[in-house]
Amino acid sequence: MRVIVQIRIEGAESRPVTVPLHTIDHPCDLLQDVGLGLGDAKSNLGKLQQTLVRQQLERYLADRRGCAHCGRPRAIKGYHPLRFRTANGDIALRSPRWHRCRCEQCREATFCPRATS
Ligand SMILES: [Zn+2]
């Protein structure tokens, strides 16, 4: 038997997204093979955590990209690697650096949005 584990992510302002997490495809010829193994459970939890963190970070950044004064989206200067630690393992992400908007009065021309919350 094959079981495909998916999650559906819904947001108030976005279309629902279905993300496949894991395919469980192992025989159940023996009684001890029935059900989820510890490896399957850990893998599913790790992938769920990874998907959730990526979706939440994307939403977090999208909510803050517009200039607080004029609403124009800030230009992206670049990205740097970010290792996000969770109870289910580290997640490799990339964190953006944005240019300040022309209407913002600040000494720094660019900033990291993670550092502003
Ligand atoms: Zn602005």
Image: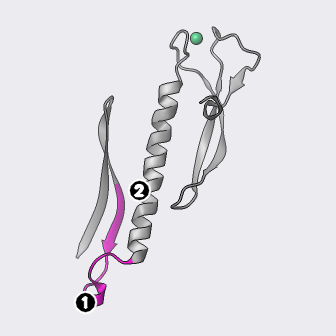
Q: In which quarter of the image is residue 68?
A: top right
The image shows residue 89 at horizontal and vertical percentages of 55, 61
Ligand 1 visible in quadrant? top right
Residue under the point 44% across and 59% down? 47
- Label ID, residue 48: 2
In the rendered structure, the answer to whether residue 67 lies left or right of residue 11 reads right
Label 2 beta carbon less than 8 Å to ligand 1: no
Question: What span is in magenta?
Answer: 20-37
**Label 1: few (<14), some or many (≥20) within 10 Å?**
few
Furthest toward the right, the residue is 107
- What amino acid is at disc 2? Leu
The image shows residue 102 at horizontal and vertical percentages of 65, 10
Q: Is residue 22 magenta?
A: yes
Residue under the point 58% across and 21% down? 74
**Label 2: few (<14), some or many (≥20) within 10 Å?**
many
- Label ID, residue 31: 1
Q: Is residue 64 magenta?
A: no
- Label ID, residue 21: none
The image shows residue 44 at horizontal and vertical percentages of 39, 64
Q: Foreground residue, 109 or 12? A: 12
In the rendered structure, the answer to whether residue 117 lies left or right of residue 42 reads right
Label 1's element? helix
